[in-house]
Image: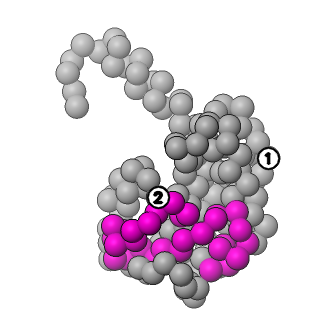
Amino acid sequence: MEDNFIYKENNHLVIIGWNERTKNLLSYFDEPLILNKIVLIDNTLEENHLLPDHIYFIKGEPQDPRTLAKANIQDATTLLITADLDQIEEEADMNSILSLIASKGQNPSIYSVVEVLTSKHSVNAKHAGADQIIQRSFPISILMYDKLFNKEILY
């Protein structure tokens, strides 16, 4: 785990955005399989000691080509972009799409999964080259509907 270096490995996963969803996702991975294979880019994280030891951290703007070069995006195989829930939905989606465009500019063949907050930006993410789009409101809406009409108490 570092905060300002150049990642030199290849065939790795780049994650843009540290948040609770990213933290939960990483708990599903088997650590030995991903050792030295995940690079996290985030501009808001101040204390990188909160990250698991096998995560390589780069503090910077994910739309900046220099930050992406530090993550060796050109040799990465997979990209996950999470939406910043601290921003207005429109702004968060635009930043996610801009991060996707910048990443695809350096590695057009990278497999990309992008989280968007609004349905109208799903189309824009697809046009920008997203391979998979997670529309955040869709699964939450299904869960809300289920909880409204399912009287069992499940946590």
Find residue 112 and report its horizontal and vertical position in percent: 63, 58
Residue hosting label 1: 127
Which residue sits at x=24%, y=13%?
151
Q: What residue occupies the far bottom of the structure in this picture? A: 8
Q: Secondary structure at mark 1?
A: helix
Whole-angstrom CA distance, mark 2 to mark 1, is: 25 Å
Quadrant placement of the N terminus: bottom left
Which residue sits at x=68%, y=37%?
90
Q: Nearer the viewer, mark 2 or mark 1?
A: 2
Label 2 vs 1, first from the N-terminus: 2
Q: Residues within 10 Å of mark 2 (few under 14, many from 20)?
A: many
Which residue sits at x=21%, y=18%?
152
Q: Is residue 142 left or right of residue 42?
A: left
* Above or below 9: residue 17: above
* Above or below 5: residue 57: above
Which residue sits at x=42%, y=49%?
21
Q: Is residue 140 magenta?
A: no
Residue hosting label 2: 18
Q: Is residue 24 left or right of residue 74?
A: left
Does the image show residue 86? yes
Residue 76 lies in quadrant: bottom right
Q: What residue occupies the far left of the structure in this picture? A: 153
- Amino acid beneath label 2: Trp
- Amino acid beneath label 1: His
Find residue 31 and report its horizontal and vertical position in percent: 32, 72
Q: Is residue 51 magenta?
A: yes
Region in magenta? 42-70
Quadrant placement of the C terminus: top left
Q: Nearer the viewer, residue 27 or 1?
A: 1
